[in-house]
């Protein structure tokens, strides 16, 4: 119990520190790093298993410590609930009024989004050629969007969530850093601070109701349909439908619940770290960095194509097609006085496309190469 308390306190402190510098999904990154450090130091929480006590005539159970090589893991019900909270939160981004900002450009944006998806899977397949990465993990690690959701569902698809988490957050960090540089250096635009307004208590109350319905129906539906990561994709699908049809109204997921969910998902990935796995990730990072840069450059070229197709400005289309960093994108779009509705709608459509389609495309690609998931 003391180890879980230590993990929770250190994660909370790290989350506050990261939020000060505006890191996206700060609690997930904090949970990942803190859990990894504690795991490598031998201070992480250990799973405890129950077995029947042969000495107990009544057939009672006793709690026993696992073998030393048993990987630590967050209790599954807690992890699945955290997946569901994240899924509902992402679904609430699919606001019909926001997506209407695409107007008649929805088809070109969708086509460019599919092209970005194919680019991600292709680069992931190249990453999967590395001896320390299997094809499925490689594809998921380089999917250009929905980093937190991808980390949450990687284990369910049979990939290495530790590798995916590190590479995904490397991608997010690089994109976030380069957006203001490109926007100012190439387009002469400036970024503007975007103040996040926390949802009202009434909206959070509706959000609790939405969570109860989407988790209560979405998780069993995901299991019934045998969806991998049904704890994420089931609630995500239901909340997306609720938003697009207007049923969800102004429902908003509580920031506190979302922070806890992010932390749990980060713990799940971080607690499995070992020194050997850390070294393996270190060997992969240079190649991954190169492929991330390739995805960034090709995505910018797709932005040029989108501008020519839709007539929107080059800057807006560059921001609309960046492979991540939605908050940095929003700040740049607001500061430049661009078509913010178009940019945000295109980014949200990309994230939804990546989460709903990319994992299945990645798994199909890995199977075609004859590499079954672990």
Image (cartoon, rainbow, N blue to C red):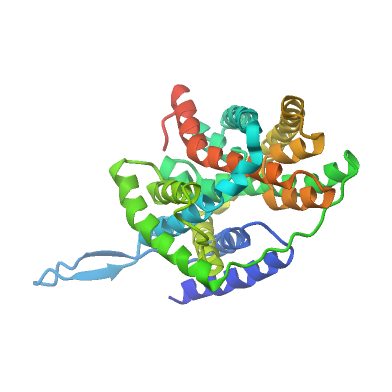
Residue 201 position, x and y percent, is: 53, 73
Residue 33, horizontal then vertical, whole percent? 61, 60
Relative to the observer, which residue lies in front, 373 or 18?
18
In this rendering, the answer to whether 274 lies above or below 253 is above
Query: From the image, which quarter does the C terminus lie in?
Result: top left
* In this view, 225 is above or below 214: above
- What quarter of the picture does the N terminus occupy? bottom left
> Residue 259's x, y, as percent?
55, 65
> Quarter-wise, where is residue 157 in the image?
top left
Residue 367 as seen in the image, left or right of residue 225: right
Q: Total number of numbered labels?
A: 0
Figure check: 220 above or below 143:
below
In the image: residue 329, left or right of residue 276? right
Residue 122 in view of the camera: yes
| Relative side of 122 to 322, left or right | left
Q: Is residue 156 left or right of residue 164?
A: left
Residue drawn at 12 percent across, 68 percent down: 59
């Amino acid at each position: 119990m003391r180890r879980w308390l230590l993990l929770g306190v250190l994660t909370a402190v790290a989350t506050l520190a990261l939020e000060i510098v505006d890191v996206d999904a700060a609690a997930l990154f904090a949970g990942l790093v803190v859990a990894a450090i504690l795991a490598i130091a031998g201070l992480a929480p250990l799973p405890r298993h129950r077995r029947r006590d042969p000495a107990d005539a009544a057939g009672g159970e006793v709690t026993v410590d696992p073998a030393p090589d048993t990987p630590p893991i967050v209790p599954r019900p807690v992890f699945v609930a955290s997946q569901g909270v994240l899924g509902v939160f992402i679904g609430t981004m699919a606001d019909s009024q926001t997506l209407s900002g695409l107007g008649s450009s929805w088809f070109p944006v969708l086509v460019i989004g599919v092209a970005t998806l194919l680019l991600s899977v292709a680069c992931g397949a190249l990453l999967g050629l590395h001896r320390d990465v299997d094809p499925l993990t490689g594809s998921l690690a380089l999917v250009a969007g929905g980093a937190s959701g991808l980390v949450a569902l990687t284990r369910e698809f049979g990939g290495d969530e530790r590798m995916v988490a590190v590479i995904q957050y490397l991608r997010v960090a690089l994109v976030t850093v380069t957006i203001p540089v490109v926007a100012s250096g190439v387009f002469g635009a400036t970024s503007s601070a975007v103040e996040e307004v926390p949802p009202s208590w009434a909206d959070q109350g509706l959000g609790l109701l939405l969570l109860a319905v989407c988790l209560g129906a979405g998780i069993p539906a995901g299991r019934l349909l045998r969806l991998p990561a049904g704890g994420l994709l089931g609630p995500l699908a239901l909340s997306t439908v609720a938003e697009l049809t207007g049923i969800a109204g102004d429902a908003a997921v509580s920031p506190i619940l979302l922070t806890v969910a992010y932390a749990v998902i980060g713990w799940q990935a971080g607690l499995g770290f070992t020194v050997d796995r850390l070294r393996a990730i270190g060997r992969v990072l240079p190649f991954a960095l190169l492929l991330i840069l390739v995805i960034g450059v090709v995505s910018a070229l797709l932005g040029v194509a989108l501008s020519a197709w839709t007539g929107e400005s080059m800057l807006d289309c560059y921001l609309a097609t960046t492979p991540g960093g939605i908050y940095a994108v929003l700040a740049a779009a607001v500061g430049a006085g661009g078509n913010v509705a178009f940019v945000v709608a295109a980014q949200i459509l990309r994230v939804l496309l990546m989460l709903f389609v990319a994992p299945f495309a990645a798994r199909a690609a890995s199977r075609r190469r004859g590499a079954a998931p672990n």
